[in-house]
Structure formats: C-alpha cells, structure tokens
Image (spheres, rainbow, N blue to C red):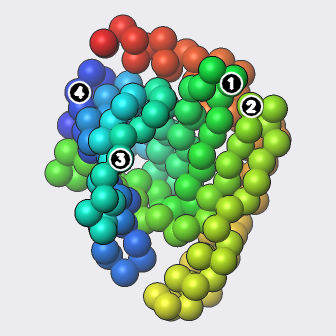
Amino acid sequence: MAGLEPGSTIQIHSYKHNGQLHRVWQNSLILKGNSNVVIVANDKTLVSESDGRTWITREPAICYFHSKYWFNIIGMIRNDGIYYYCNIGSPFVFEQDAIKYIDYDLDVKVYPDMTFTLLDEDEYEVHRKQMNYPEVLDRILKNNVDYLIQWVRQRKGPFAPDFVDQWYERYLTYR
C-alpha cells in the first residue's frame, strides 16, 4: 500500500470519539504494511499528549494494527519478558503519513505469562456518557474486548510464540 513501505517511518495518532487528538507517537518504523495489517516498531520514541506533555517510550515495542478489528496491540520487550498493552479502539486508517484510530479508553494489559487485566472501565463509562456513544458502538467495543481475550488465550496473532521476537529481529535489520 502506498506510504506503508517497509523501512519508512510514520506517526501514530490516537483520537477520542469527539474527534479531539489524544496522543501522537513519532517515528515508528514500518515493518509490514498493507490495507489490512500494519506492523510497526519503535524504541525510545517521543510521545506527545493532547495537554502538551511529552514523554519517551522506555523499551522497544512492536505495534500491530488491523483494519477489521476494534483493537490494536503493542508488544513491549522488557528484560523479564514481553508485556502487551492492548487498546480497544477503532480499526486503523492510514492518511497523511500516519496511522490513525479512535481510542475508546478500555485497555487490556497482558503479562509475559499470558495473564491479563482489563483496565480503565471507569474512564470508559465516563466518556461513553459524555460523548454519547451509540448503543451499537458500546456492543461492538465490548464484543471486541471478548474477541481480544480469546486471542490472548489462544496465543493468536501478536500473542503467538515468537511473533514479537521475529518482528523485533526484522526491526534490528533496519537500525
């Protein structure tokens, strides 16, 4: 797909349901890109928050985006294993050299032993009411939490053994 060539860099933009820009990651390296799946890597990447704060990621990460599923998955490579941070959000779009999605607050943190925790349910409820999420959207998001958890339990996609390691090895070939 044009603009998603392996070896090129892009930004990642997350928005809120009301269209407000939420967070921007600079300089993620494309490892795979087509109309359905984008896999990028980054390490010590500058992140800008909507309130003006900035921070730098602490470890290498492999990020998985899909055009069909309402979640994206970040595999963070740490000394004691791979931790996953999964954002429940809209399927990605690619425009203006950026991967873009709407972040719907619900997150799933997955530990190296594949246990997991659902995070930010309170924040989701506040935003669901404030921004008037339609009932159909609420069902889609909750169904995708269940679907994501099935992926974790089945070791599917980015949770498969060696998925993150193999993509990280590819990332190292570009450095």
Q: Are marks 2 and 1 in contact (CB under 8 Å)?
A: yes
Amino acid type, mark 2 = Pro
Q: Secondary structure at mark 2?
A: loop
> Residue 171 location, x and y as percent?
40, 17
Do residues under tags 4 and 3 come within 8 Å of each other at their CB atoms?
A: no
SS at mark 4 in the image: loop
Provide the secondary structure element on which disc 3 rests: strand
Q: Residues within 10 Å of mark 2 (few under 14, many from 20)?
A: some
Q: How many marks?
A: 4
Extreme residue in the top direction: 173
Where on the picture, by quarter, is residue 11?
A: top left
Q: Can you identify the residue that label 2 sits on?
A: 112
Pointer 4: what residue? 8
State the image coordinates of residue 118 (x, y, percent, origin top left).
73, 59
Q: Which residue is mark 3?
A: 55
Q: Nearer the viewer's eye, disc 1 or disc 3?
A: 3
Q: Secondary structure at mark 1?
A: strand
Circle nearer the N terminus (1, 3): 3
